[in-house]
Amino acid sequence: MHSQLRWMAITMAATSLLHLCHSLKDQQSLLSQPDKITTLPGQPQISFQQFSGYITVDQKGQRALFYYFVEAELEPSSKPLVLWLNGGPGCSSLGVGAFSENGPFRPSGDMLIRNENSWNREANMLYLETPAGVGFSYSTDDSYYDNVDDKMTARDNLVFLQGWFNKFPQYRNRDLYITGESYAGHYVPQLAALIVQFNKKEKLINLKGIALGNPVLEFSTDFNSRAEFFWSHGLISDSTYKLFTSACNYSRYVGEYYRGSLSPVCSRVMSQVTKETSRFVDKYDVTLDVCISSVLSQSMVLNPQQVTERVDVCVEDETVNYLNRKDVQSALHARLNGVPKWSVCSSVLGYELLNVEIPTISVVGSLIKSGIPVVVYSGDQDSVIPLTGSRTLVQRLANELGLKTTVPYRVWFSGNQVGGWTQVYGNMLTFATVRGASHEAPFSQPERSLVLFRGILQGRPLPETF
Ligand SMILES: *[C@@H]1O[C@H](CO)[C@@H](O)[C@H](O)[C@H]1NC(C)=O
């Protein structure tokens, strides 16, 4: 072909391709258009788009999961996609994650206040209420709630992602990170493992990494580090510490409790522990002064206590009030299905609680082997899943995988203060603490948590200097 002709042919092809791209783009925005949020009641002026709505996850159309999606503040098309999952099991990523931790707003009275350290400064943030029965997510067939387990949750989460990508095809090939905290130490690795499996057939999901905050990874190590944490922070006496590590440790107590076979000795030890620690100290942040807010109740299940002993010293909860407003629900395209009101943790879900004993640290190991970098971070004031247990588990996993230390244990900086400590193994597995942070690190240390989040996305060690 004559070179000029060939050039013309190429230009024409390119032009029509460009047209095709434009019309595809229009179509793309059409699919998600019904879910676009015009404005949330009481919100300040913003420059980014928000979407929320439902993705059906079963064939009969009985089960649908609710999501809230916040595009990045600047240049969303060049930023990664981050899925955030809260734990419980059975607590809401919308109420806890988005509206109390790392989302763009926090409810205050009738208003939404801007969160200056929102994670959508760095990424497109997708919050998912999962499994069905949590928050606005539902099953019209009630019997589904009877026995939900980790496997069912992971499967629904994958189906959700596929459905969500159909609605937002412009994000289909985007770098994806999956993040979460607490019981999401189960949800996140299990979903990531399904994605790796799914990608073997057709590489569709561009999973780039996972991050886990104060996660349950191995029941016994995680739960039994509580005794030492209580003791070293002065919450229990020497003699009670001895009982709590020898007569009945915490993993044994929880195991017996969930099997409905609480032994007299465990009952006695736990009531002594409970008496000394007092119900007026927040177990999710032992230095926090006042409020055992329902916001902090997401791991209720990880902290089982006789109902009479549970006390909520916070009279009102801004998030619960806000999300139960009719105008808010309508702006979010949300409906209540089979529940009288939206709540932080599900009242209808019957989760298989003994799944807490399934170790997911091994799943984390297999993810690293398939090339997915992992960050485990810990709010260092949390006694429910203390940093010491997570640090032990990460260290042990690094040894098993033969990963050598690439960044030795050292401080990292946020602003010109120490943000916490970190260690990296084989440039693949990172441990980091967040200094002064609770179980919900972005809630109590938003600025430090944003620095940590940047590190996660850049795949680089946390700042060594200031
Ligand atoms: C906890 O108690 C159980 C049952 O007595 C025991 O098998 C386990 O080794 C203990 N774990 C720790 C860390 O003390």
Image (cartoon, helix red, strand yellow):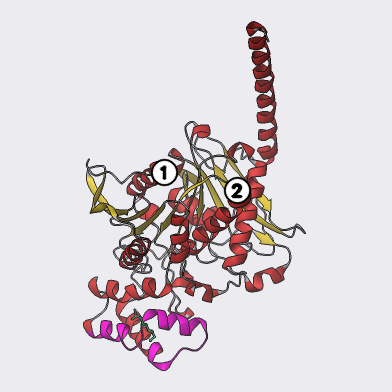
For image coordinates 51% across by 34% down, the residue present is 76
- Specify start and end residues of the magenta stretch as a single range: 239-266
Of badges 1 and 2, nearer the viewer stands 1
Q: Amino acid at mark 1?
A: Leu
- Residue in view at x 43 percent, y 52 percent: 101
Image quarter for residue 274? bottom left
Q: Residue 284: give x, y in percent of width and height.
A: 37, 65
Q: Which corner quadrant of the figure contains ligand 1?
A: bottom left
Q: Are marks 1 and 2 in contact (CB under 8 Å)?
A: no
Residue at 30%, 80% in the rendered image: 276
Q: Quadrant of the N terminus?
A: top right
At label 2, the amino acid type is Val
Q: What residue is disc 1 on?
A: 457
Closer to the camera in the image, 424 or 308: 424
| Residue placed under numbered mark 2 in the picture | 328
| Residue 114 visible, this orientation | no
Residue 419: x and y, percent?
Answer: 27, 50
Q: Secondary structure at mark 2?
A: helix
The picture quadrant where one finds residue 340 is bottom right
Quadrant of the image for the C terminus? top left
Q: Is residue 319 left or right of residue 244?
A: right
**Is residue 241 highlighted in magenta?**
yes
Q: CA distance from mark 1 to mark 2?
A: 32 Å
Against 3, residue 326 (above or below) is below
Magenta-colored segment: predominant secondary structure: helix
